[in-house]
Image (cartoon, helix red, strand yellow):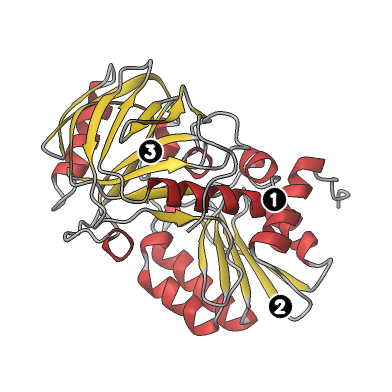
Amino acid sequence: MSEPTTPRPDVARGAAELLHTCLACTGADRVLVLTDRATRPLAEVIADQARSVTSASVAVIPDIAAGYETARQEIERALDTHRPTVTVFAAADPGDLLAWDPTFWDHLERLGARHAHMPALDDVCLGIGMAVDYTEVARFTLGVRDLLAGTRSAHITSATGTDLSLTCSPDRPWTPFTGLYQCGGQGGRLPQGEVFCTPLTAEGILAVSVVGYPFNAESGLLAEPLLIEVADGSAVAFDHPDERFASRLGTWLGDAPGGLRLGEFALGTNRSLPAITGNLLFDENVPGVHIAFGHPFPDYTGADWESPVHVDMVVERPSVHMDGLTVLTDGRYRIPDRLPRS
């Protein structure tokens, strides 16, 4: 048997921030890391960090892409066996199926577990995305939320071709995702750092360099941007050199009720992340913009409609003006560091 390798320092720091800050682990916790064979080395780093303060186990589940129901049953068994108070999902899930499975979240809620959802976890996500001060990420994210409260108009441009105008409403509030899941029953994706709303409508062109689940694992960082024409708040045309890719995306959204409607307008607020990589788990949080078509998360946004699909699209290095305020220029924040808090 080969000797275990020592993780890179940034990966170890990321695992420590995940366990100690984001999930607030203590000696009273029981930690369970759900993983697969490909991601197990990173899962073991996370478990080792947890063992510095408490007990931790790693459960290796079958490949979700090969059979979701089989993997789901193994996850259920692991949860029932270990009855964790803290869980981390670190396995490949190309369709993002587990994140949209209400029975999984119901199970975690019954356990009162704090949960970090990290599909497609890699060295960059754990080493760069997590090896940051999440207390600071939370502070800045909440400040951006307060700054944008009541916004009525936004204009997004980018060197790649974005020129999109959005109409927002104070009745559809901005929601912060800080990455801190420190109380029982809390959970969400990590890395993290974003604020989002559902606009009333939008018009113009959106040029995106990353397309989310279920396309992300295949498409990664696009060599040429995907251009989306938006009219009256919905996508009406998709243009990309890979015509098959554009057609598949259009069909995926178009076949779902509400799938073509613009459901989310978000700003990434994790200023420690330098640039997008092609992995949506990481890229959503890089300072910039992502737009999602489909489900608008009405419990957060106040939107009055739903959809069975939700596909995020990341704009590379955008400039954003909101109610006349320059918020971002070329992917860099241009607002005061010490933001007001309500």
Along the viewing direction, whichever of 23 and 31 lies nearer the viewer:
23
Residue 240 sits in quarter: top left
Above or below residue 245? Residue 192 is below
Amino acid tagged 2: Asp
The amino acid type, in three-letter code, at marker 3 is His
| Mark nearer the viewer, 2 or 1 | 2
Please give the residue where the numbered disc 2 appears in the rendered image: 29
Residue 217 coordinates in the image, percent (x, y): 44, 39
Q: Residues within 10 Å of mark 2 (few under 14, many from 20)?
A: some
Disc 1 is placed on an element classified as: helix
Q: Is residue 84 left or right of residue 285?
A: right
Q: How many marks?
A: 3
Which disc number belongs to residue 297?
none
Disc 3: CA contacts within 10 A as few (<14), some (14-19) or many (>=20): many
The tag earlier along the polypeptide, 3 or 1, is 1
User: Where does residue 126 sit, x and y in percent of width and height?
Assistant: 66, 46
SS category of the residue bearing label 2: loop
> Looking at the image, which residue sits at the far right?
3
The residue wearing badge 1 is 42
